[in-house]
Image (cartoon, rainbow, N blue to C red):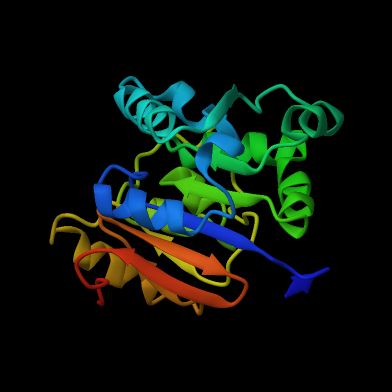
Amino acid sequence: MLYNGIVKTIILTSAGFKTPELQREFLKALPKPPASLKLAYVTTASKVEENKDFVERDRKILIELGFQMEEIDIEGKDYEELKILLKNKDIIFVQGGNTFYLLKHVRSSGFEREVKELLEQGVIYVGVSAGSYVACPTIDMATWKHQDRERYGVTDLNAMNLVPFLLSVHYNREKYREALLSGAKDTKLPLRILTDDQALLVKDREVTLIGSPDEVKL
């Protein structure tokens, strides 16, 4: 849907923009050069992970691409605080980690409400792994491959519903196929699957795979 001529743009990734191809496609989707864009780097999901190397890797890539970055943690923030933190940002980049922990604080902070308002103003949403999962109607697929993930008290798996499909990321090993088949049979929503070298560019209702090779089909 268009809001005052603005196209809502969402980019959902498995592992960020770690390949040159994904970086090129990301830059092509932007309205201005990176140096002219302010990016909010939301790291909340990574706080409970022992290995945070991926956070530093993606931070370095974004800095090298030239973005003006501000790191933001949404835990403990309320809606008014978030509005101030995200004011004048052009891109909301939501990093990976524990999907349940992220969803818990998406809810408690009012992040979902603010993101939806910002999308209508032309702000771009970028998700990485957990950041991509919470953009879907539900995070049910976060349980398919790893049943033992800490859930931090989250029992309601409904998420932000920014896109009309479920997503499974990090599909780099054939061992995940059976788990995804089992999970997908219990949902009526479409399922998209990404390897770490792929992402989905969503412009309103149009979804385009970027990266390579072809999209995985079950």
The image shows residue 61 at horizontal and vertical percentages of 36, 32
Instruction: Determine the image quadrant of residue 101.
Output: top right
Name the residue rendered at 28%, 42% in the picture: 18
Name the residue rendered at 57%, 69% in the picture: 203
The image shows residue 162 at horizontal and vertical percentages of 63, 61
> Is 141 situated above or below 59?
below
Residue 68 seen in the current view: yes
Q: Quadrant of the C terminus?
A: bottom left
Side of 6 relative to 166 (left or right): right
Name the residue rendered at 34%, 64% in the picture: 210
The image shows residue 123 at horizontal and vertical percentages of 68, 50
Please state which of residues 138 and 22 is positioned toward the viewer in this rendering.
Answer: 22
Instruction: Determine the image quadrant of residue 179.
Output: bottom left
Please state which of residues 172 and 28 is positioned toward the viewer in this rendering.
Answer: 28
Q: Quadrant of the N terminus?
A: bottom right
Instruction: Determine the image quadrant of residue 52.
Output: top left
The image shows residue 216 at horizontal and vertical percentages of 24, 71
Residue at the farthest right position: 80
Residue at the farthest left position: 174
* Total numbered labels placed on residues in the image: 0
> Is 195 situated above or below 34?
below
Residue 196 seen in the current view: no
Please state which of residues 20 and 95 is positioned toward the viewer in this rendering.
Answer: 20
Side of 153 relative to 195 (left or right): right
Name the residue rendered at 75%, 73% in the picture: 2
